[in-house]
Amino acid sequence: MVFKIFKKKNEETFPLPGRVSTDKEELFCYGFDSSSIQGEPSAVVKPVSTDEVSQMVAFANKQRTPIVARGAGTGMTGGAVPVKDAIILSLDSMNKILEIDERNMIAVVEPGVINGHLQEQLEAKGLFYPPDPSSMNYCTLGGNVAENAGGPRAIKYGVTRDYVLGLEVVLPDGRVMMTGGKTYKNVVGYDLTRLIVGSEGTLCVVTKIFLKVLPLPAETMTLLCTYSEINDAALTVSKITSSGIIPRVLEFMDNESVRAVENYRQFGLPTDAEALLLIEVDGSRASVSEEADKIVSICTSLNARVRIAEDMFAKKRIWEARRAISPALYRIKPTKINEDIVVPRGRIPEMLQALKEISEKYNLKIVNFGHAGDGNIHVNVMTDKNDKGEYERAKNSVKDIFQATLKLEGTISGEHGVGLTKKQYVGMELSDTSIEIMKAIKNVFDPNGIMNPGKMFP
């Protein structure tokens, strides 16, 4: 099969003829991610092996054709959206769990494995992979690596980068390289593994992932804490984390997010609450009971009503409510601008006050929820793209949100990456020198600039 758009004068044949699609419907489906930004790929290629990825990437590099590797497209910043005429390299067919090594506590997977599927397989063996993005039932581990995904359990267990021991990657010229491996310690040379994790597909294509896993905690207890004052909830977060207790989860929902969820589906959350905290502790039965008692004491001292989930059904119900926030927000407005800022935990009250002031300044509804335990707040500016005046105000508010975040010693992206939506703001946080060094690293890996171009850098 000759794919004419990429032909040079030598009439070179497009590789992997059985894996290529140019159907309009498929091109449309692979043209966007959860950011809803639409791109225009010229082909979708679905390799099933490292060798096929190598062939495809080498061909694209020789033709100077952009290539965008992607998984399930659950990213929020346009990282998987193709520039015009780029080839989409869809890795969702490379979806095998290659090994679960129980003795050495390691899992080896292909990039198309769904996060939640790995969790299920590990739990059946008494093991545990902590990173748990809200999209865990859909997102792929390759995408998690590309974005250095986090999740509610990050406060205690860390993010994707903390569990990646090694990678097999395909470089832009088609060479296959290993970084790291199955050992928990490795200080030979530069740490290329940690460099690649979070690089948003701009350096290479990940084809195999070596993951550290943990023993499954014996016991987990879930608490739902209701507050009539949002500041009390924010103060609770810092008081818990400074008390010597590290909960497994410490999630925050403001009143708008609670109401949105209950309007979307009735979970039984108290809509009169100004804020909710969803808290989990895990470990041995004795330690869980002791930590839960201390947390209840802290919460009630700050005027919270505390409810403990009595069984697995109640826990599941609470988590279903938490994971329903994002789709529920569309009942408020048809468009949302979703940011994931992070501030030091002790400055959450100041950040929430700043967000309230920005909401009033621009006459916009801003809904806040997220991983309060590590200071990661998902800020949702609710608007309507068809209302030009309102949408313009919403876009303008983003810079104010980032300025307030940086003023409080925070960062403009905790787990969503930069992609397309945040690249214009990168210079607010990173110095010219930092950006220059990053671009130089990009050039070493990808001198022809074919790997996911137009992302990350302003």
Image (tube, helix red, strand yellow):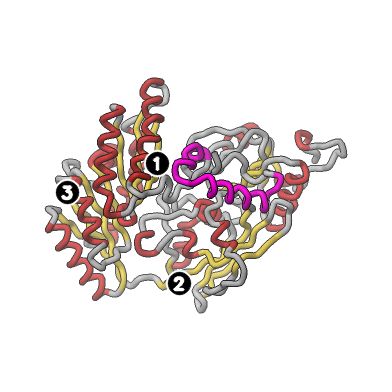
- Left or right: 261 as drawn, with respect to 435: left
Q: Closer to the camera, 356 or 56?
A: 356
Amino acid type, mark 2 = Lys
Q: Among all residues in the image, which is located at the extreme right?
A: 10
Mark in front: 2 vs 3: 3
Q: Closer to the camera, 309 or 382?
A: 382
Q: Please say if the residues under marks 2 and 3 sit with CB atoms less than 8 Å apart.
A: no
User: What residue is shown at x 17% (from left), y 49% (from top)?
Assistant: 227
Badge 3 density bin: few <14, some 14–19, many ≥20, Cα 10 Å: many
Q: Is residue 156 above or below residue 225?
A: below
- Which label number is shown at residue 125? 2
Badge 2 density bin: few <14, some 14–19, many ≥20, Cα 10 Å: few
- Which label number is shown at residue 53? none
Q: Residue 302 at x, y = what percent? A: 14, 55
Magenta span contains residue 249: no
Distance between the alpha carbons at the discs numbered 1 and 2: 37 Å
Magenta span contains residue 434: yes
Badge 1 density bin: few <14, some 14–19, many ≥20, Cα 10 Å: many
The region drawn magenta spans 420-448
- Left or right: 207 as drawn, with respect to 325: right
Mark in front: 1 vs 2: 1
N-terminal-most mark, 1 or 3: 3
Q: Is residue 313 above or below residue 123?
A: above
Q: Which residue is labeled 3 in the image?
A: 227
